[in-house]
Amino acid sequence: MTFRGWKMSETLSITESVCPECLNRIPAARVQYGEDIYLEKECPAHGQFKTIIWRGSPAFSGWVRPKTPSFPKNPFTEVRQGCPFDCGLCPEHEQQSCCVLLEVTQRCDLHCPVCFADAAHCPPPDLTHVEIRAWYQRLLEAGGPFNIQLSGGEPCVRDDLAEIIRIGRSYGFTFFQLNTNGLRIARDLAYLSELKEAGLSTVFLQFDGTRDEIFRTIRGRELLEKKMAVIENCARLDIGVVLVPTLVPGVNTDNIGDILKLALAHMPTVRGVHFQPVSYFGRYPETPTDEMRITIPEVICAIATQTGGLIPASTLCPPGGENALCSFHGNYVLMPDGALKPLTRHKGESCCQPVPAAEGALRSREFVAEHWSTPATSLSVLSGPSFGEWDVFLERKRTHTFCVSGMAFQDAWTLDLERLRDCYIHTASPDGRLVPFCAYNLTNRNGKALYRQTNVVANA
């Protein structure tokens, strides 16, 4: 492909994508210009598209790593039209499920300007307990139990959310993560207590910043006081919290360090921060430009710079389960003097030995269940006889492990089908299929969906 107005640098690899206008499958290439990587593609009907996917260091070449595919144990759909039109999962998907999202409602008590689910816009009726039981049974047939994320919409608008957890536990599911804006659990401690008694493992809290003007821009209203009330209530009930900022350039990307410092100040209740660079599907204000995006290396650089080196870039690593271009993670132990002892380190060079995909998914599932859940009870060794630094470290590792991670979801401009086939975060569709998150939420420039609340779009 030759892109008018651009001097082609090096084509690193070939893949496939979709057209942002018609969602038809089209050829694509990862092309390098200096330290930056673009996804370039051309639709016969709608022309050329070029979108930034990687800016700066760590270097793209040292980040990517090969994987040995792990195909679904029990695929629910056949391969007819090819990726991404046969999701369910199909036999050609190259990763098993790690976390499955159950969207228990499409209702929401916010109307955010940016929303991947376009929640609260003509929501359908909530799923019944009979339908939810069928979901759990279906997940067992797919090879579960998996980690469960209760999502929506806003799941806490349902009064019976605790019963949904209890139903899941009756089917053998043990890890339940609540993806929430926090409005209800900020004001209703009894509701949160019932969720914990039912088996809630952790709260995945939408938390975009430490300033109210950030919330006004991204969520439409001031919410910081309510977010802090969620952390306080979870601390009272010993429920672990992961803060989840959506990063929007020019809005809160200067606030990354302050979010991390706030999280550390509220350990061990806050177990970590999971950054999500903004992606453009569902509901968003305008067609995105490259200036409206922040890429994984830019987030890593901002973490290191804005924390004054407390979290060095070298301690943030490629993922072990999903595609290397999808995420990063770093794990630490917070010591009594405020220092962070890293448990991870990125060597800065691509590994030539393929990583088994199934092994990565299993380790990710186990890590999240262990480290994002309710904090471990301290043995209080620090108040006893003198212990060496190693004993202190081991004790803090039980109670004060801190996780920093991020995930770059794909939209119609950035969708890379090679990445999509590596996805291990799946959404349970109302019709019983398991659909990779980015495929399920994918919409074209005009908001037409590929899977969400629609029939599958045919690839002409």
Image (spheres, helix red, strand yellow):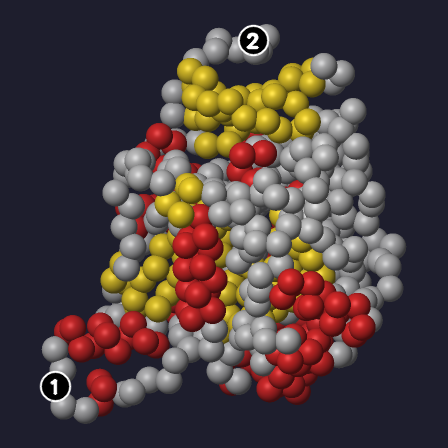
Judge by depth and name the residue closer to the eye, 434 or 447: 434
The answer to whether residue 228 is above or below residue 288 is below
Quarter of the image where one finds residue 289 = top right
The answer to whether residue 320 is above or below residue 292 is below
Judge by depth and name the residue closer to the eye, 250 or 38: 38
Q: Earlier in the sequence, mark 1 or mark 2?
A: 2
Q: Position of residue 250 (x, y in %)?
A: 55, 41
In the figure, is residue 423 to the left or right of 333? right
- Name which residue type carries label 1: Ser
* Mark 1 nearby-residue class (10 Å; few <14, some 14–19, many ≥20): few
User: SS for tag 2?
Assistant: loop
Quarter of the image where one finds residue 405 = bottom left
- Name which residue type carries label 2: Thr
Q: Position of residue 423 (x, y in %)?
A: 55, 46
The answer to whether residue 9 is above or below residue 415 is above
Q: Marks 1 and 2, how far apart in space?
A: 68 Å
Q: Position of residue 271 (x, y in %)?
A: 43, 68
Quadrant of the image containing the N terminus: top right
Residue placed at 59% from the left, 27% from the top?
16
In the figure, is residue 10 to the left or right of 114? left
Q: Which residue is mark 1?
A: 386
